[in-house]
Amino acid sequence: MKKEICTISVSSNWLGDEYTFYEDHTIKRVYDNHSLNSNKTEWLEPHQISKQNKDKLIRECPEEVKEQVMHILDYP
């Protein structure tokens, strides 16, 4: 079973957008396209996440795991 590091929400308005980071360096995203198409799940590689979203994720990341998440995201 994957060991979770943290889940970070970068939701804007009423659409959900959450990223869950795991110790094996996998990233799961659960998001809503629109109100009738919600809770879609995708597994991402760091290069698939935009610089803008990486910035948001790091800003919202809990301080105690920030270094670990930055390493997974290959963040500067």
Image: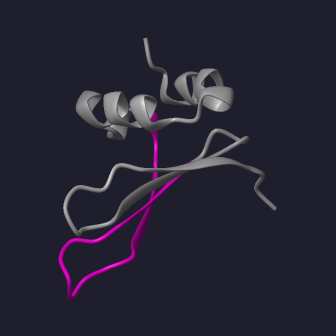
Residue placed most toward the observer, 45 or 61: 61
Based on the picture, tell me whether residue 50 belongs to the magenta stretch.
no
Residue placed most toward the observer, 12 or 2: 12
Where is residue 10? Give x, y as percent.
34, 49
Identify the residue at horizontal 40%, vertical 29% (top origin): 59
Identify the residue at horizontal 18%, vertical 76% (top origin): 34
Left or right of 5 on screen, residue 74:
left
Left or right of 47 on screen, residue 69:
right
Q: How is the image coloured?
A: one colour
* Picture layout, residue 52 above or below residue 8: above
State the image quarter where residue 18 is shown: bottom left
Where the C terminus falls, by quadrant?
top left
Q: Residue furthest top?
A: 76
Where is residue 13? Give x, y as percent.
19, 61
Where the N terminus falls, by quadrant?
bottom right
The magenta segment is 27-46
Residue placed most toward the observer, 33 or 61: 61
Identify the residue at horizontal 60%, vertical 27% (top origin): 63
Number of marks drawn = 0
* Picture layout, residue 67 above or below residue 34: above
Identify the residue at horizontal 28%, vertical 71% (top origin): 32
State the image quarter where residue 29 is shown: bottom left
Q: Residue furthest right?
A: 1
Q: Residue furthest bottom?
A: 36
Where is residue 58? Give x, y as percent.
44, 29
